[in-house]
Image (cartoon, rainbow, N blue to C red):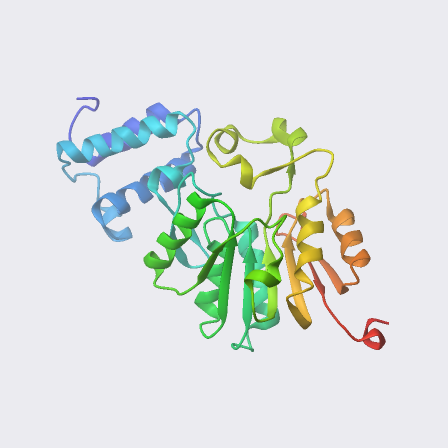
Amino acid sequence: MFVTSNEFKAIRNYFSEELSELYAPNELKIILKFLFLKRFDATSADYILADDKRLSESDLLFFHDALKRLRKNEPFQYVIGEAEFYGLLLKCDERALIPRPETEELVDWILEDNLINQDLALLDICSGSGCIALALKSKLTEAKVTALELSTEAIDLIEGNIEFTGLNLEVIKADALTTNYEDLILDKVDVIVSNPPYIPHDDRSLMEANVLGFEPEMALFVEDDDPLIFYREIMERSQAILKDRGWLYFEIHEDLSEGVRSLFEESNFVNIELRKDLQGKDRMMRGQVVTSMHERQ
């Protein structure tokens, strides 16, 4: 046996000894708590009293396998198979990016602007796990929310999360860069949101090993010579399906805010606004479609 006893406190000590060089003590506590809650369908109160809990051989193997995966830098959300996002528990694995806290801030902004109007049509482009679309649907329960995604694997994950959460979305397989959106979206929409790939390959050296080694590259990277490609194409194609006074929201790379703003201006969007995330980084931008020339001025 790889631990000195079959009590949970032995697992706690084993994780601390084996993973202390990779994770801070507080991170390890959070990871182990999530693993315990998932394995035993337990409560936080159960976890507080867990030290003397005796584990079966299959329980021990569960924690041993999780530790081996963590030791290889696999993100703990993938190891657990779940991630929390905007009050939702979502299935999470290597088929899509792990939902990030800064993306929750983007959802906050959209809801801040639109919460009073439940009768909305929203489109989430490059949906990934479906986290943005599902979070919006959880708060705008009467809205029609559509998720557009190219990856077949990610679409399977979105559909799993629809079943997991009980929320209702339409999911469409399409390439954000080449699709004429009006061919897929028959009725115009009030809001479009996208967290597209935006990291230039040159930024690889700045990224964590657990991101590079496990998260899908197609959801992360763009070519160095055209890092704005998704913003430009989505802006151009979105105008055909956005209602008058409709909004387009983006999550952005902190170094690309001026470029994204210029694209908004060149595409005749108005009321363009940049927001920083809680870390003070340029992270979100929105623009509005207004068809009246008088109102544009």
Res 3 quadrant in image: top left
Give the camera-side residue of 185 and 126.
185
Q: In screen coordinates, is 93 left or right of 13?
A: right
x then y, percent, for residue 288: 71, 66
Residue 113, compared with residue 61, is above or below; it is below
x then y, percent, for residue 163: 33, 58
Residue 242, compared with residue 35, is above or below; it is below
Res 225 quadrant in image: top right
- Residue drawn at the location 35% of the way across and 60% of the way down: 165
x then y, percent, for residue 194: 59, 54
Q: Residue furthest top?
A: 1
Give the camera-side residue of 53 and 173.
173
For residue 109, say whether it is visible: no
The quarter of the rendered structure image containing the C terminus is bottom right
For residue 209, say whether it is visible: yes
Q: In screen coordinates, is 233 left or right of 99?
A: right
Give the camera-side residue of 52 and 194.
194
- Residue drawn at the location 49% of the way across and 60% of the way down: 133
Q: Residue furthest front?
A: 183
The quarter of the rendered structure image containing the N terminus is top left
- Residue drawn at the location 54% of the way across and 41% of the way down: 219
x then y, percent, for residue 247: 66, 66
- Residue drawn at the location 56% of the way across and 77% of the way down: 117
